[in-house]
Amino acid sequence: MAAGFAALACSAPVLAAASYKTSWTSVVSYVVDGDTVRVRPPEGGKPVSIRVDGIDAPEICQPGGTMARDALKRQVLGKRVVVQTKVRDVYGRLVGRILLNRQDQGALLVAQGLAWSYRYRDDPGPYAAEQSRAQAQRLGMFSRVGKAAPVYPAVFRKKHGSCYARYR
């Protein structure tokens, strides 16, 4: 898996901060799930929640949820990253990109088949090409060896409710 991740890292986009309002360097102190981390603010104080922009990872209680969280944890936990944020979501988390060595960690998760490119209505999201490649190569949750097809997190939540209280 590590060798596969390194190969994907070479092809993952290195993105500019054009649409992001703030950018700072921080250390990831906790990985909540496949698309949310906590970082130490540069000025100190309580850790800040960051919702990784452009992706939707499986809920922690759905198939693939712990795999996505663990992959993100192996990659960024305890490491100095660049955080680029633009807005807060309805839960109060900052929404932004996490860059490690200038590589977008959300793009890497999608390229591994561990998260979807976040889609909105007819927009396939910023990592649609990475998702298509992961699906074609049957990576991560798209491997489907003896498993049911993966379920997009919003569909899962609609059917089963949030697993937030049970796992966070």
Image (cartoon, rainbow, N blue to C red):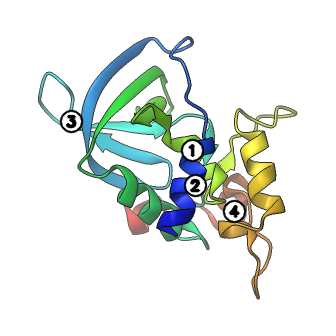
Circle 4: element type: helix
Which label was assigned to residue 10? 1
Which label was assigned to residue 7? 2
> Residue 113 sits in which quadrant?
bottom right
Residue holding disc 3: 40
Q: Quadrant of the C terminus?
A: bottom left
> Residue 80 sits in which quadrant?
top left
Which label was assigned to residue 78? none
The x, y position of residue 7, in whole percent, is 58, 54
Q: Could you tell whether 95 is left or right of 130 in the image?
A: left
The x, y position of residue 22, in whole percent, is 39, 14
Residue holding disc 4: 156
The x, y position of residue 142, in whole percent, is 74, 67
Outermost residue toward the bottom in this view: 146
**Which is more toward the observer, 132 or 158?**
132
The x, y position of residue 71, in whole percent, is 46, 61
Amino acid type shown at disc 3: Arg
Amino acid type shown at disc 2: Ala
| Residue found 48% across the figure and 31% down from its top | 97
Q: CA distance from mark 2 to mark 1?
A: 5 Å
> In this orientation, does residue 20 appear?
yes
Label 2 CA crowd tier, 10 Å (few <14, some 14–19, many 20+): few
